[in-house]
Amino acid sequence: QVQLVESGGGFMQPGGSLRLSCAASRLSFSIYAMGWYRQAPGKERELVATISSGGSTNYGDSVKGRFTISRDNGKNTVYLQMNSLKPEDTAVYYCNARFVGVRQLDYWGQGTQVTVSS
């Protein structure tokens, strides 16, 4: 079955940087749109960033200019570079793979915790 495995989360002080990775297996990675979502305690899951199979990117308003999503189809991996981190970036970050065809296919990783605090 499809597996999405996130890594790179952890603890960081405000203003610092982290890079998340999501390694995908058992899917045709290059044809999937990939994304990062996050969920903070007591809040709904929200969009962080997405990247299409063609490389087009989209960002949530709260992370524009600070986060960058990228993908390496040769490694079946999507990345999220997070700079200028803020305490409000604290959340569990989830990787998503989405294919829209005759029907929509959605796969999710298990999540990785990011905590930003002084």
Image (cartoon, helix red, strand yellow):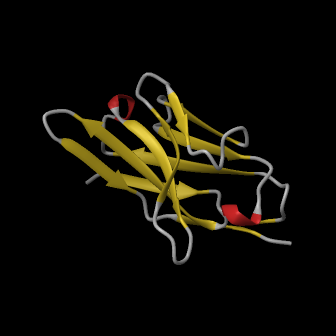
Q: Would residue 10 be visible to someone looking at this image?
A: no
Q: What is the x, y in percent for residue 41?
A: 55, 76
- Seen at 28% across and 37% down, the residue is 99
- Report whether 88 appears left or right of 52: right
Depicted 66 relative to depicted 31: above or below:
below
Residue at the limit of the structure toward the bottom, as seen here: 42
- Report whether 63 appears left or right of 97: right
- Seen at 25% across and 54% down, the residue is 1
- Seen at 49% across and 64% down, the residue is 111
Where on the picture, by quarter, is residue 65?
top right
- Seen at 52% across and 77% down, the residue is 42
Depicted 103 relative to depicted 108: above or below:
above
Residue at the limit of the structure toward the front, as seen here: 61
Depicted 88 relative to depicted 57: above or below:
below
Q: What is the x, y in percent for residue 110?
A: 44, 65
- The foreground one among 75 and 101 is 101
Q: What is the x, y in percent for residue 4?
A: 41, 53
- Report whether 34 appears left or right of 28: right
Which of the image's four quarters has the C terminus? bottom right
- The foreground one among 44 and 2 is 44
Q: Would residue 108 be visible to someone looking at this image?
A: yes
Count of numbered badges drawn on the protein: 0
Q: What is the x, y in percent for residue 22?
A: 51, 49
- Report whether 67 appears left or right of 1: right
- The foreground one among 113 and 40 is 40
Where on the picture, by quarter, is residue 40?
bottom right
Residue at the limit of the structure toward the top, as seen here: 54
